[in-house]
């Protein structure tokens, strides 16, 4: 006999907390790549830059997206989901960027 799933079984629940409850307290390499790639695409399509670019030599969208992520000026959030359909929405300002620390 096959059990039919109900709407209640597939309901998602959000974890509301100021601290990171799901996953590490840093950006994963996959999240970082997704954010930088999406922002570079936006910049190449004409989106405004969110910080001052006066002293920059290289004005590539990819470099600008990296700098925007490092300076934490991007108004983006990450949604991390668990297998039991609970999720948490985390602003990227609350997450550490290990890659940026390695390059300093």
Image (cartoon, grey):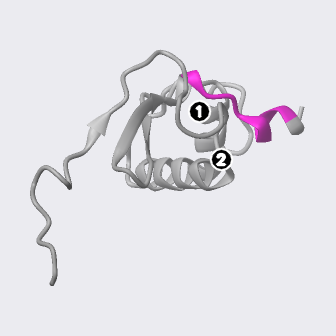
**Neighbours of disc 1 within 10 Å: few (<14), some (14-19), many (20+):** some
Residue 97 among magenta residues: yes
Which residue in the rendered view is the most extreme toward the front? 1
Residue range in magenta is 94-101
Q: In the rendered image of this protein, does residue 67 appear above or below residue 31?
A: above
* Nearer the observer, 69 or 13: 13
Residue 104 falls left or right of residue 24:
right
Circle 2 crowding by C-alpha within 10 Å: few under 14, some 14–19, many from 20: some
Q: How many marks?
A: 2
Above/below status of 52 relative to 35? above
Residue on which disc 1 sits: 68
Give how far apart the Cα atoms at labels 1 and 2 are.
17 Å
In x, y percent, where is residue 39? Answer: 48, 47
Q: Is residue 25 a member of the stretch shown in magenta? A: no
Q: Which residue is mark 2?
A: 28
User: Along the horizontal axis of the image, is 61 left or right of 56?
Assistant: left
In x, y percent, where is residue 92? Answer: 53, 30
Q: Quadrant of the N terminus?
A: bottom left
């Amino acid at each position: 006999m096959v059990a039919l799933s109900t709407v209640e079984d597939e309901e998602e629940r959000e974890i509301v907390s100021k601290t990171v409850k799901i996953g590490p307290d840093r950006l994963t390499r996959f999240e970082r790549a997704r954010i930088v790639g999406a922002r570079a695409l936006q910049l190449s399509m004409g989106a405004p830059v969110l910080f001052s670019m006066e002293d920059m030599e290289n004005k590539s969208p990819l470099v600008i997206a990296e700098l925007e992520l490092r300076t934490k000026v991007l108004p983006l959030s990450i949604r991390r989901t668990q297998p039991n359909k609970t999720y948490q929405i985390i602003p990227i300002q609350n997450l550490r960027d290990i890659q940026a620390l390695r390059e300093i």
